[in-house]
Amino acid sequence: MIDEHEWRSVLQVAEDGTFSAAAKHLYVSQPSLSQCIKKIEGELGEALFDRSQTPLLLTPAGEIYVEKAREIQRLKQELVKGTADLSELRTGNLCIGSSRTRSSCYLTQPLIEFHRNYPGIRLTVREHSLWELKEDVLAGAVDFALLYEPLPDKNFASIPLLKERTLLAVPMDHPFAVRFGGRQITPYPTLSFARLHKQPFIKLQESRRMAHIYRNLCQETQCEPDVVFEANSIIDAAELCMAGLGITLVTDMLVRGWRWKEAPFFFELEENVEERQLVAAYGRGQHLSQAAKTFIALLKR
């Protein structure tokens, strides 16, 4: 019941909530996975999952098992990271937690440079929402994750990377852009969010941090844009803006790092929007491998 194959199976079922989904992630058949769980339950004399619920719920015994299995998982990861430092970056693994936007606009060149310098290190990027990335950090599923301050609690440690500014993106054929000849000028001209009242607008879904900035701007300016679409990422919102659907909020990281086919027009906001501090976050007390430290140094350049 403490065999790695067995505790990983229990953790996957607990994460996915069904045997069928867990079996797909583990690349095993569902009957084989069910037999594995029943074997563990037989040895313990207790059921780990309440099978009358969908998704499956952990029983009290299951909660204890999952807690201890995660401790074993963290210990194994710490062991691997600690011994990997002895290889002087010749071999090893590095897993980075990120969002789609930061992967595309911030990680691409550092990933290429790191691989060129340390080809023996296997690189993985785990893309999740900010909430899921925080869970990944605490679970030890990533070496570090790109998150924003403030971090939730003292269980997190962090290394500052850069500060992000919030900008407005406007379709090139919108009157706001047309008055500048439809061509971007720098430094970016300013525009008040208050002028977006009833203007077609692409907002981010509520789970996204930019949605919080949008709400604050609406409250501050008493402005109500005409929300025509709720996007899942800043990249999606920016591409729809570029296609002419509406105005949206973006970050200067996206403006600099995205591979634009044809960029929209960008404005600085007249309102004071606090810059967002991006950090490399990892679990406090967690060993930060030499590979992670080296990659973070690349990000800070």
Image (spheres, rainbow, N blue to C red):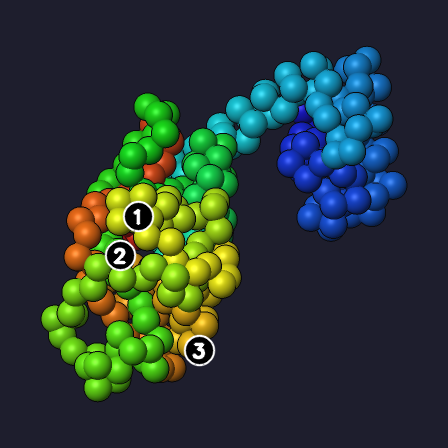
Q: Secondary structure at mark 3?
A: loop
Name which residue type carries label 3.
Answer: Ala
Q: Nearer the viewer, mark 3 or mark 1?
A: 1
Q: Which residue is mark 2?
A: 194
Residue 8 has which mark? none
Q: Are marks 1 and 2 in contact (CB under 8 Å)?
A: yes
Residue that carries the numbered disc 1 in the rendered image: 222
Kindly give the residue lying farthest to the bottom in the view shown.
Answer: 181
| In the image: residue 147, left or right of residue 38 | left
Q: Position of residue 245 (x, y in %)?
A: 45, 72
Who's the residue at 29% across and 34% down the image?
A: 150
Look at the numbered disc 1 and give the secondary structure of its residue: loop
Q: Callout 2: 10 Å neighbours few (<14), some, many (20+)?
A: some
Q: Earlier in the sequence, mark 1 or mark 2?
A: 2
Q: Where residue 2 sits: x, y (%)?
A: 67, 24
Task: Find the distance from the CA under tag 3 to the CA under tag 1.
Answer: 27 Å
Q: Residue at x 78, y 39 (%)?
A: 19
Relative to 268, residue 300 above or below = above
Amino acid type, callout 2? Ala
Q: Position of residue 99 (x, y in %)?
A: 43, 53
Estimate the spatial distance between the alpha carbons at disc 1 and disc 2, rounded to whole Å: 7 Å
**Earlier residue among tags 3 and 2:** 2
Towards the viewer: 251 or 69 = 251
**Can you tell which mark lies on residue 243?**
3
Q: Could one spot residue 245 in this view of the protein?
A: yes
- Residue 267, position as x, y percentages in the image: 22, 67
| Horizontal side, residue 37 vs residue 89: left or right | right
Q: Amino acid at mark 1?
A: Gln
Mark-to-mark CA distance, 3 and 2: 23 Å
Residue 184 falls in image quadrant? bottom left
Name the quadrant of the C terminus: bottom left
For the N terminus, the quadrant is top right
